[in-house]
Amino acid sequence: MATFTNKATLSYSGRTTESNTVTGTLPETLTVTKQPLSDTYAPGGTVTYAITLINDGAVAQSGLTLTDNLGAYELTEGVTVYPLTYVGGTLTYYVNGVLQATPTIDDAVPLTVSGLSVPAGGNGILLYQATANGFAPLEAGGSIVNTVTLQSVGGEVETASATVLAEADAQLSIVKSLSPTTVPENGRVTYTFQILNTGNEAAVATDNVTVTDLFQPILNDITVTLNGAVLEEGSGYTYDEATGLFTTVPSVITVPAATYVLGEDGYTVVPGSAVLTVTGTI
């Protein structure tokens, strides 16, 4: 509740004296809450937010302005960045459950919406989406905390915050190369598989990372390495020389998590990697 204080001044015969100070309270009639519809975000993914305005008073509230700081933080002294980007066209507003005309968006960064009204004893709900952009933290435990501020015509201000966490996961991709690319008959070739992890968690043995390849033409007398260490057939991989089917044993390949470097253009991802090679005779 808001409080107020007041005291009186008594003047007589050229003298003044002050009364004691009295304190009163004003019950809050307008409140705001903010709730993300998901607890996590992925790079480039969207988060839907629900903002609820509740008017417990006997008088309608109009001319309200809502500002969402989109998770703003200071990158360097005097430089503020916004890890969330409002998705245009996603804003909707309901009053007592009834869809209203789209409110006026005065600015997208930070998101500022004006002209909101809430009837006496009623509620309003704003729904909109925001994208996690290049300034959204990606490391394990990373989060976006963003705050909405609701301001009335009379200058009263209410705030509410919400936190979403970076998704904790491994994100793997694979790149294959051949050396040499021109191979004489009965020549030796090496296939190199680079497995990249752009996620914030390592791919571990229980993730059962497996590489499968059907070599055509079929390779003979193969040698297999993982990160420079020789893998043994049976314990590290299986290979059918009749068909050319090669498969690593699940749980053998692990890939470390990526690292992330924050700069003036956002986060740079340095993938974790594992390198598998298969060398054989064609």
Image (cartoon, rainbow, N blue to C red):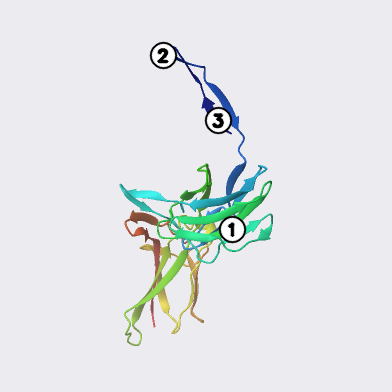
Q: Secondary structure at mark 1?
A: strand
Circles 2 and 1: CB distance less than 8 Å?
A: no
Q: Quadrant of the N terminus?
A: top right
Give the residue number, with chain letter if any, for mark 3.
Answer: 3
As drawn, the residue found furthest toward the front would be: 13
When the figure is inspected, residue 218 is found, relative to residue 155, above or below; the finding is: below
Q: Which mark is residue 14?
A: 2
For discs 3 and 2, the disc positioned in front in the rendered view: 2
- Who comes first in sequence, dot 1 or dot 3? 3
Q: How far apart are the alpha carbons under marks 2 and 1?
A: 62 Å
> Which amino acid is tagged 3?
Thr
Q: Position of residue 4 (x, y in %)?
A: 54, 29
Q: Position of residue 81 (x, y in %)?
A: 38, 54
> Which amino acid is tagged 1?
Leu
When the figure is inspected, residue 194 is found, relative to residue 97, above or below; the finding is: below
Q: Which mark is residue 127?
A: 1
Q: How far apart are the alpha carbons under marks 1 and 3?
A: 32 Å
Neighbours of disc 2 within 10 Å: few (<14), some (14-19), many (20+): few
Q: Secondary structure at mark 3?
A: strand
Q: Position of residue 49 (x, y in %)?
A: 56, 55
